[in-house]
Image: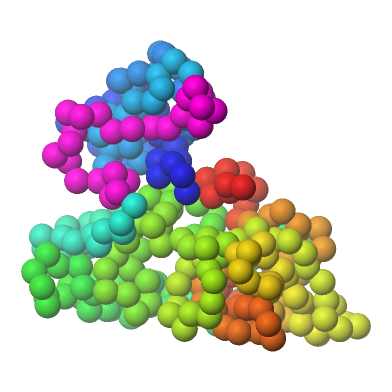
Amino acid sequence: MANRIAFAYYLNGWSVEDQNIQDLRNRAAKILPNEFTKEMEGHIYCPACYTTLSRSPREKAVFSNNRAARFIHLPRHKNVKCDLRTRQAQGKTYINIELARKAIENDELAIIDSFMRQPPAQQEKEGEGIYDDIVEDIDGPITDAPLSRHNGEKFSVPSKITTVAGICRRFDRNLYKYYLMPGSQSAVLLQSLLVDIRDVKGADPVLRLYWGIIKSSFSAGADPNRHLRMTELHCNADVKDFYIKAIGSEQLRKGISEESVGRIIIFWGSITVSGIGLCLNRPGWGEYALLPEAYAHFLRHE
């Protein structure tokens, strides 16, 4: 993502010094750089550190070289730590367990124990695929998580068994939320966790959170429900092809079909070799989902 601050919160009359952050998140409008107007100056805030932002350039939506405008932090807040100032993913730590638990309660931090392997019972209502399925996460075990600022100390905090669809459902809110993923040693902003599959040049056994744009999708057999569905993603020029391989009925239930070309899909897993290309082979039910089109502009770049 060229612009790390995909959107800013806009709420006239709010300030981080004496207002509630939850109030800002609930009431503020989400403003893209090209939606910024002069009247918003001084009233737009970072979605990660909540300090005041400005737009560069202020007067135009593009630079003279046609590069899109972007949001920037103000110099007076340079001492406030914010992961959106750097491309390097920073681990989130807490002074004590009470602050860590409060962050979880305030929906600022999620501890993911695992992603669901099996689908929930089919709902009677049909329509948007997985978004008709009520179950997106369930309580997981109490986990010893490496969230302390003191090396080696861990906090016992509640975790979730969840789905990628649950992350996608409120993607604008979750994009700047910290996630401790399965097997990870630090909680990182979701934005920093997402890997563009077009940057991947070979197999990788490490479990990561990826995203890609669907190039094609077709059934690999006569029965579109029982046989594998091959969903191809746009991939790196050094890679022959990249497919998500999962049972057709499951993909169709998620809304993935021949009509999904151009849609963004987010998935969790390891990348394996498939013939002369690469693939995500047989992901679990909760390990992949379409991103709602309303959020596509937060990720898409051609």
247 lies above or below 24: below
x, y (%) of residue 69?
Answer: 46, 29
Indicate how the structure is coloured in the image.
rainbow
Q: Is residue 132 visible?
A: no
Report the span colored magenta.
61-86
Count every numbered label the image shows and give the total.
0
> Can you tell which quarter of the image residue 286 is in?
bottom right
Q: Does 108 appear above or below 81?
A: below
Dominant secondary-structure state across the stretch colored magenta:
loop
Quarter of the figure with residue 190: bottom left
Q: Nearer the viewer, residue 169 or 192?
A: 192
- Image x and y of residue 134, in percent: 59, 65
> Vertical placement of 187 versus 27: above or below?
below
From this viewpoint, which residue is outermost toward the right?
A: 222
Q: Quadrant of residue 213?
A: bottom right
Residue 189 visible somewhere in the drawing: yes
Residue depicted at x 34% and y 26%: 54
In the image: residue 290, left or right of residue 29 = right
Q: Is residue 302 covered in magenta?
A: no
In the picture shown, does residue 231 fall above or below 128?
below
Where's residue 206, x and y in %? 43, 80
Who is closer to the viewer here, 230 or 154? 230
Q: Residue at x 41, y 22 (%)?
A: 57
* Image point (31%, 59%), residue name: 89
Q: Is residue 72 magenta?
A: yes
Front residue (pair 24, 263)? 263
Residue under the point 72% across and 53% down? 262
Task: From the top left corner, tell me how far across and down residue 122 is, in percent.
Answer: 70, 74
273 to the left or right of 38: right
